[in-house]
Image: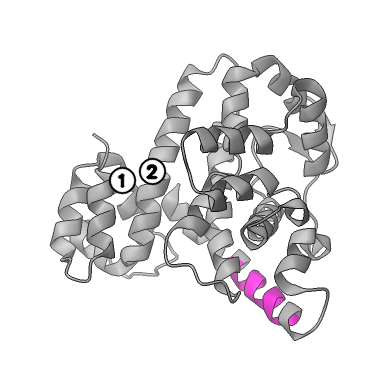
């Protein structure tokens, strides 16, 4: 039984909500409940005693992470269903591990910028940036198989290969898919330009944050999904167009940003350990 996301969203946004009300809705979704308890008991929180109560877990996690977890759970479940029905064995878990990691770091990156965000757009943009690969797996399985069996030096090479075979790359396919589902421009343009944020007509900060987050997650050893791409070396993200959009070429902002990124990277494995 899938959680009522609208009811949960309304509760966590309300100042009047009680922990018991939120816990009651979460209990209706076994998958979300399991992930909630797994996250709060991960080493990230460093609790001395194991938490087995949903209300206690809600208290320790806080409302914002509850929202993130509730958004991640349906995506994970959908990818799990796709995995079980896929005609070709694909590393689905790697794809959604990367997607959630990118979502977490996109939020961390944008938190250190002047951009004011009062909803979940930053998290969703990171979470959905590779949704085009899911569409490719079912609409273009043969072409995707060729891409996955070819080694590439960079993500740009992967996109170029996809365009040669299909006419569109996974970013374009994903953006089109999300547009048809009437998601906001912030998300659709971010997905469309997350590999080339300097080309985005609008929403460059979002696209830049996702590009940098994507590289950071791959540097942490969580690949982008299906394709074979060379590992991302330390500080390679400093040369990205997204980094320059976010922080400029050099100066005090870059120094602070590098420290912020290093801290986020250090915490990423524990955060993902609870979500996945």
Q: Is residue 236 above or below residue 96?
A: below
Question: Residue 40, image x and y in percent?
Answer: 34, 60
Q: What's the distance in space between the residues labelled 2 and 1, CA to CA?
A: 6 Å
Q: Earlier in the sequence, mark 2 or mark 1?
A: 1
- Point out which mark residue 32 bears: 1
Specify whether residue 268 is painted magenta: no
Count neighbours of disc 2 (C-alpha within 10 A) and say few if under 14, some if 14 to 19, many if 20 or more.
Answer: many
Task: Answer with the quarter of the image where residue 219 lies.
Answer: bottom right
Magenta stretch: give its range: 255-264
Q: Are marks 2 and 1 in contact (CB under 8 Å)?
A: yes
Q: Is residue 256 visible?
A: yes
- Point out which mark residue 73 bears: 2
Specify the color scheme.
Answer: one colour
Quadrant for the N terminus, please.
Answer: top left
Count neighbours of disc 1 (C-alpha within 10 A) and say few if under 14, some if 14 to 19, many if 20 or more.
Answer: many
Specify whether residue 261 is painted magenta: yes
Q: Is residue 68 above or below residue 92?
A: below
């Amino acid at each position: 039984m899938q959680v009522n996301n609208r009811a949960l969203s309304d509760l966590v946004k309300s100042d009047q909500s009680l922990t018991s009300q939120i816990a009651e809705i979460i209990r209706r979704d076994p998958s979300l409940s399991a992930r909630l308890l797994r996250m709060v008991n991960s080493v990230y929180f460093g609790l001395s005693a194991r938490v087995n109560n949903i209300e206690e877990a809600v208290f320790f996690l806080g409302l914002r992470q509850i929202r993130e977890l509730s958004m991640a759970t349906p995506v994970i479940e959908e990818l799990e269903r796709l995995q079980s029905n896929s005609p070709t064995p694909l590393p689905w878990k790697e794809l959604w591990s990367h997607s959630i990691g990118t979502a977490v770091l996109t939020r961390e990156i944008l938190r250190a910028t002047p951009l004011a965000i009062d909803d979940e757009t930053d998290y969703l943009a990171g979470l959905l940036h590779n949704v085009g690969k899911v569409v490719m797996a079912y609409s273009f399985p043969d072409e995707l198989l060729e891409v996955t069996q070819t080694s590439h030096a960079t993500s740009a090479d992967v996109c170029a290969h996809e365009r040669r075979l299909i006419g569109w790359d996974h970013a374009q396919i994903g953006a089109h898919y999300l547009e048809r589902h009437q998601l906001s421009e912030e998300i659709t343009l971010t997905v469309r330009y997350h590999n080339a944020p300097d080309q985005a007509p609008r929403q460059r900060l979002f696209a830049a944050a996702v590009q940098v987050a994507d590289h950071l997650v791959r540097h942490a050893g969580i690949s982008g999904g299906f394709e074979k791409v060379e590992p991302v070396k330390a500080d390679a993200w400093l040369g990205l167009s997204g980094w320059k959009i976010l922080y400029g070429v050099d100066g005090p902002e870059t120094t602070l940003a590098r420290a912020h990124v290093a801290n986020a990277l250090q915490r990423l494995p524990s955060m993902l350990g609870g979500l996945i």
